[in-house]
Image (cartoon, rainbow, N blue to C red):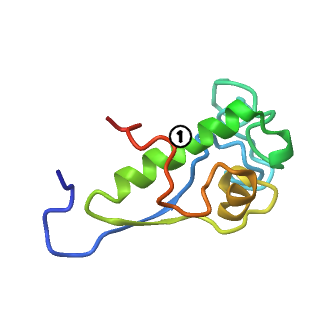
Amino acid sequence: MTFNTNQLWTIIGEWTPAMTDCAKYLNGRGIGARYDGTFSGSTVVGSCAGKSGSSSSFSSSYKNFLRQMWEAQVITFEKGSGWIQWTWKAENADDWSYQAGLQGGWIPQDPTDLIFPNICD
């Protein structure tokens, strides 16, 4: 099944394996995050500790989660379209960085090398 039934090219851009808004300045300078409730009017979902910033603070289970999210999105986006991940390098937000993902192992050097090829089944 393909999502793109027309004959125009479709590219998915500005996506990331990160599933929080914990990255510093993501919502604006000094604004906070919805995930940890520091964004005005939001309610706490969880702690941002170990969810953004330097990947040295990421647990192996969180890195595994990032890998699963990365693969699920790549598999989905390649069903009739293409993808470009946002961004190559992010300031103090390794969960948003393709470069850091390669170094940290949650993004494979060869993007076709999937550990969870059936994650979307």
Q: How far across and down, in percent of the image, does residue 53 sit? A: 81, 48
Q: How far across and down, in percent of the image, does residue 11 sit? A: 37, 69
Foreground residue among 79 and 45: 79
The answer to whether residue 85 is left or right of residue 62 is left
Above/below status of 54 relative to 41:
below
Foreground residue among 82 and 112: 112
- Which residue is drawn at the image coordinates 73% and 49% (left, top)? 23
- Which residue is drawn at the image coordinates 65% and 43% (left, top)? 21
- Which residue is drawn at the image coordinates 17% and 50% (left, top)? 1
The answer to whether residue 66 is left or right of residue 78 is right
Give the residue at the far bottom of this rendering.
Answer: 8
Q: How far across and down, in percent of the image, does residue 100 sit? A: 74, 58
Residue hosting label 1: 68
Identified by mark 1, the residue type is Gln
Above/below status of 40 relative to 54:
above
Asked which secondary structure carries label 1, the reply is helix
User: Which of the image's four quarters has the C terminus?
Assistant: top left
Foreground residue among 3 and 113: 113
- Which residue is drawn at the image coordinates 58% and 40% (left, top)? 19
Q: How far across and down, in percent of the image, does residue 113 sit? A: 51, 55
Count of labels shown? Answer: 1
Above/below status of 43 relative to 93:
above
The answer to whether residue 72 is left or right of residue 85 is left
